[in-house]
Image (spheres, helix red, strand yellow):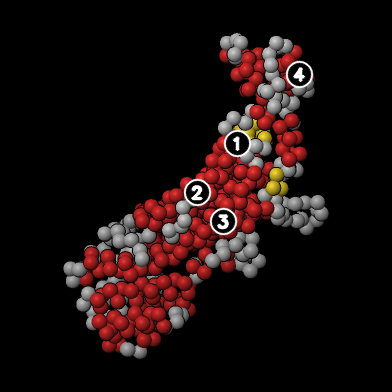
Amino acid sequence: MAGSVHDSTIYHRLFPAGEAGRLFTDTAEVRAMLLVEGALAKAQGAMGLIPEISAQAIHRATLEIPPDPGALGAAAGQNGVPVPGLVAEFRKAMQAPEHAQYLHWGATSQDIMDSALMLRLRQLLIQCETGLRAVLTPLADLAAAQADQPMAGRTYGQDATPTSLGAHVAQWGWPLLELLAELPALRAGALWVSLSGAAGTGAEFAGRGAELRAALAVALNLQDPGRSWHVDRGPVLRIAAWLTRVATALGKIGEDLTLAVQSSQGELRLGQAGGSSTMPQKQNPVQPSVLIALARQAGGLNATLSQVALSRQERDGAAWFTEWLTLPQLCLGTAAAVETARAMVPGIAPVPQALAAGLARSGGLIHAEALSFRLARDMRRPEAQQAVKDLARHSAETGHPLSGLAQRAFPEAELSEIFDPARQMGEAPANARAFASAVRDLPRSHG
């Protein structure tokens, strides 16, 4: 098996990261670092910190010289970071030592790498937003179409009270809507430029470090944090937490679908299912299983990634390396979850007969709560609850429907409404329609 499923020729279609896969390659990283170096030189030239002609030459070269990641391996293995090797190789490739000497002027490796990382994370957030919007649209359509379709609501895996399929779908979608709503604040509070020099003091920028950092932020369309954040990994952790919650919310859909399509339930049908190597009848819920697996992986990676907050002193190699080992996998895993859900959700369809059977399977016990509240109109609530508990126990033991037992025990009570699932869904249909309306009213993306 390959070191990562996303790099595997066998498994990459099972865990499809889509365009996000292009963001987490050696070539993409080197290209992003060169964009930062070019923007930095241009800003320094405009401020007179380096010669303007050299700044222009460096900026132009960063756009024209193709990166060769393979040439950086030896230096990265020795130095622990790729930037020294990148700077050396780029200076050679420029073939203009009088200008190349001003490349990377006053910056440190972490400035370049963190700013380059934020450029790629910005693109990842755009891709995730686009994907989530594409997931929410068919979810909203399904919720609206099935708002009045009764189904068994379940708690602890047991029949509870009736709900609607539309409301069940809506509870998958509400967290995704909230995650989208958080994106503007996340971008403002986490997509930060980094520029503060060797030990975070900006001493190399002739007293104009704050001005230069602000100019670099504008050039790269990143936020200026107004300070050094070399050992404050909060911005990275905030993005990682958001990605983890996306994967978890999609994993919840996977969990519910795995139960809904199992042979004993069969209340929903998937548009795409996997086959078995030996059992012709099998229709395996592959995509829901992928979502569950990716959610579990995201939780574990995020737990490991949280350790980077323990960065020592002004820079901590071990904390930084931990970030490199975990963050790309979390990003790719979440992207794969979004892509999987995007392909899966439009194919989800109800099986009305199975939904009706799920409500009828308990012999009316799913209406026990409603019955107890109806009887509480004519007797004290504790007495009504006890009476229904006795009837429910008798129904479970004998197999007689609760409705018949209740009507015989309370012949004067009008109970037909109590045992009609369509009239016992409470606010579920309204909740389903509210979700669908919220999706339709989504503001346009500002990514």
Q: How many other residues sit within 10 Å of disc 2, few (<14), some (14-19) or many (≥20)?
A: few
Q: Which mark is in front, 4 or 1?
A: 1
Q: Nearer the viewer, residue 293 or 256?
A: 256
Q: How many other residues sit within 10 Å of disc 3, few (<14), some (14-19) or many (≥20)?
A: some
Res 94 seen here: yes
In the drawing, what numbered circle is on residue 400? none
Q: Which residue is mark 2?
A: 441
Image: 392 above or below 326: above
Q: Earlier in the sequence, mark 4 or mark 1?
A: 4
Q: Which mark is in front, 2 or 4?
A: 2
Q: Earlier in the sequence, mark 3 or mark 4?
A: 3
Tell me which corner region of the image, top left, top right, bottom left or bottom right, holds residue 403: top right
Q: Nearer the viewer, residue 231 or 44?
A: 44
User: Where does residue 86 sit, x and y in percent of width and height?
Assistant: 39, 77
Q: Amino acid at mark 2?
A: Asp
Q: Are marks 1 and 2 in contact (CB under 8 Å)?
A: no
Tell me which corner region of the image, top left, top right, bottom left or bottom right, holds residue 419: top right
Q: Are marks 3 and 2 in contact (CB under 8 Å)?
A: no
Q: Amino acid at mark 3?
A: Ala
Q: Which residue is mark 4?
A: 404
Q: Amino acid at mark 4?
A: Gly
Q: Secondary structure at mark 4?
A: helix
Q: Earlier in the sequence, mark 3 or mark 2?
A: 3
User: Where does residue 32 sit, x and y in percent of width and height?
Assistant: 41, 72
Residue found at the far left of this picture:
207
Res 79 seen here: no
Left or right of residue 184, residue 404 in this image? right
- How far apart, in angstroms, are the residues tagged by discs 3 and 2? 14 Å
User: Where does residue 148 sit, x and y in percent of width and height?
Assistant: 65, 37
Image: 376 above or below 321: above
Q: Earlier in the sequence, mark 1 or mark 2?
A: 1
- How far apart, in angstroms, are the residues tagged by discs 2 and 4? 46 Å
